[in-house]
Image (spheres, rainbow, N blue to C red):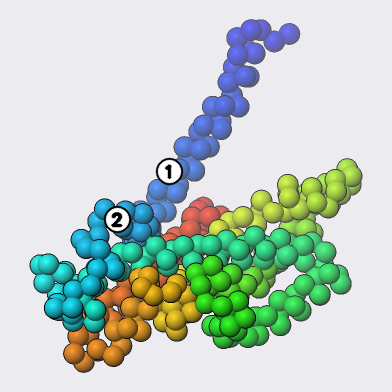
Amino acid sequence: MISRDEKVDVATVGPLNRTAARQSWLRGQLRLWRRNKMATMGLLIVLAVIAMALLAPVIAPHDPYERDIRNRIAPPSRTHLLGTDNLGRDTLSRIIYGARISLLVGGVAVGIATLVGVPLGLLAGYNARRLDTAIMRFMDAVIAFPEIVLAIAILAILGPSVLNAMIAIGIVYIPVFARTARAPGLAESRKEYVEAARAVGASNARILLRHVAPNTLSIIIVRITTSLSYAILAEAALSFLGLSAPPPTPTWGRMLNEGRGFMELAPWVAVFPGIAIAITVLGFNLLGDGLRDALDPRYRNS
């Protein structure tokens, strides 16, 4: 028979082991992030951009819509740290508020692509027969079009607006997520634990949701992070063409378009929004590299 003390020891072994495992995992993650300085920089950049977007009304020094014709095309100064545009609006304030549109459009578009593309990719990988062929040939047909051209064509049908820009960019990136989810889904669906689940009578939907999908999560997370940078670039391109938020809403792409005619007279009007786009895209790419290293067992165990 097992004594009371032995029962207590047995009961506490499980939670203690789980706690130790969590602590070991956290230590490993911290070690990886300390070792990967560029990924840490990317994380800090992304957090700074998100904070800038959330706190825009607090940290913006001026109203982004306020015009001061007497100070139009003014160079950087104490009053306007990054100068003013052709209508006298503060460039720094418009960049800060423009981060909201870029993150909103990029985040929603990637969300649409994830919610549609990942289930289709997992379904195609799990059913590697006619359904897989039908889904992936359709995805190949969509991905054959250049991304920005396809987005422009969709917006030509739907009309220019922030909502339609989200939908257009989301549709463009659905094949990317479908192809990303299909490969690990195909590999996982042929492993022993899936065969065991089938043997005990588990339904295909349960196997996909409870077994296959969780084991592809790390790859999807990395793809989401890197796709955010591409979605932000796509939004900037669409707003540059006047197909995103209507004026006078501040967007980084429109600021580039408005400043391109003043490059010789006032380069700061276009240079600073371009720098904002470049830094944000770089931050998401570096963060994606860091997440790949953190979630990949080959890097965790090295």
Q: Amino acid at mark 1?
A: Arg
Q: Residue placed at 48% from the left, 79% from the top?
A: 243
Give the camera-side residue of 280 and 287.
280
Q: Which mark is residue 57?
A: 2
| Residue in the image at 51% along x and 52% along y | 301
Picture quadrant of residue 72: bottom left
Mark closer to the observer (1, 2) = 2
Q: Residue at x 16, y 69 (%)?
A: 81
Position of 108 with respect to 7 (left or right) is left
Residue 112 in the figure: left or right of residue 232? right
Residue 205 locus on image (x, y percent): 80, 51
| Callout 1: SS | helix
**As displayed, is residue 235 above or below residue 108?**
below
Asked if residue 103 can be seen in this view, the reply is yes
- The residue tagged 1 is 27
Name which quarter of the figure residue 263 lies in. Answer: bottom left
Q: Earlier in the sequence, mark 1 or mark 2?
A: 1
**Residue 50 quadrant:** bottom left
